[in-house]
Image: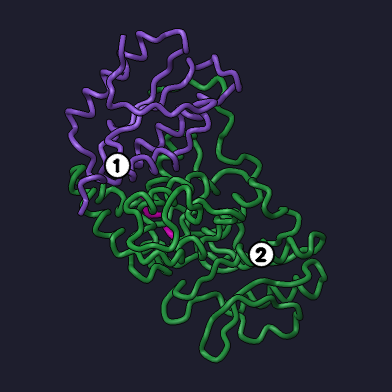
Amino acid sequence: MQYPPNLRVVRVMCSGMVSPDLILRVLSKGADGVLVVGCHLGECHYLEGNLMAAKRVAMLKKLLAFSGIDPGRLRVDWLSSAEAPTFVRVATEFIEEIRALGPSPLRVKA
Amino acid sequence: MDDKIKMKVQELLQSGKIKGFLGLRERHGQVGPYLFTDGDDLEGLVVGDRFKPGDSRYPLNKQLMKITRGDPSGCYGVLVRGCDERGLKTLFGSGQIKSEQVVPVGIACPQDLADACECLKPYPDERVAGEAAEPRSFATVAKVEAMELDERFRLWLAEFSKCIKCYGCRNICPMCYCSECTLENKDFGDIGSLPAENPVFHLTRAIHMAGRCIDCGLCNEVCPADIPLRTLYKKIADIVEEEFHCRPGYGSPETPPGLNIRGEELKH
């Protein structure tokens, strides 16, 4: 079992601390896509961290679409730490989606 | 319009209800914010319609925040348009100004200003002068939405590339009250270097305007590079409405943008 090697994992305490600023920063630094993975909804150790993440990602997706960046470059999914095979599937799927979209327009600027 | 406001302000100051009135004063051909404290001396008090309606507005709420912090027991009057009133409500809701410290003196904007602003509510709830104009919808947002994705990207990149990172949009913004700003955090961007990291520099500011932007349009007016920031922030207000079912400043001040998200059905 292996997840795609072109995925860089950044561990955080809770998906609720992934601020939109961080996602934007990562995109500006050349990432072609960002996958936010949190615990299952309703199972947050911090009560509502992943609910916040869900709202933030939904908002950021709409803002990205408005500013001409494909919202598909950002994806959110809910997995528990015991679901390694699902993580591999989600990661592989996401990489395939990003590959279909091509390099990020933020990256190819002069 | 000026006379009605002057009469109201005079009445408020003489009754001792307010310690001062924060409004605009025209002096030596310039309009600027001024705290009037004497009801008999309202020389130069204007509402900011110099050559055309609303051409000399000012983020009075930003000054009001400083004044009320310096004098936590005093009560002050302030000149408000529809947008300023929305700003006040949002600032009350986020605990930046106490509502009992403020007496708003409202004026309604004329129709041509409401049209130019594409304002959803060009009048405050309580107004001393002016007739309520017809609200307008966000045509500039619809225009961008009609474009294809890559066309939008080119448009915004062209606009953002004019940015000289003067931070004017942030400095003028009556809703920007954080003491530490992400845009000046070196972990989130290169400080003091040009060109700005576009489009992310402006998108970061846009996402921070979520739940705050009350659509006063001062950012657009102040921008030396004429970047249509207002269109971007109008859109973020629309997004907040879709996601949180509220628009900052339009509800009651007791309910800040719905962060009560537990138990809400989520779609993703």
* Residue B216 picture location, percent across and down: 47, 60
SS of the residue under disc 1: loop
Q: From the image, tell me which residue sits under label 1.
A: A30
Image location of residue B71, percent across then percent down = 79, 64
One can see residue B176 in this view: yes
Task: Name the residue nearer the viewer: A105 or B254.
Answer: A105
The residue segment tinted magenta is: B133-137
Q: Chain of mark 2?
A: B
Front: mark 2 or 1: 1
Chain A's shade in the image?
Answer: purple
**In this figure, which colouring scheme has been used for the structure?**
by chain
Q: Which quarter of the figure is the C terminus of chain B placed in?
A: top left
Res B218 seen here: no
Q: Colour of chain B?
A: green
| Residue type for callout 1 | Gly
Residue marked by disc 2:
B64
Q: Residue A27: which quarter of the image?
A: top left
To which chain does the residue with label 1 belong? A
Q: Give the residue drawn at x 30%, y 37%.
A: A31
- Residue at 47 percent of width and 12 percent of height: A81
Residue at (23% x, 29% y) in the render: A98
Specify the label residue B130 is tagged with: none
Question: Which quarter of the figure is the N terminus of chain B placed in?
Answer: bottom right
Label the magenta part by its dominant secondary structure.
loop
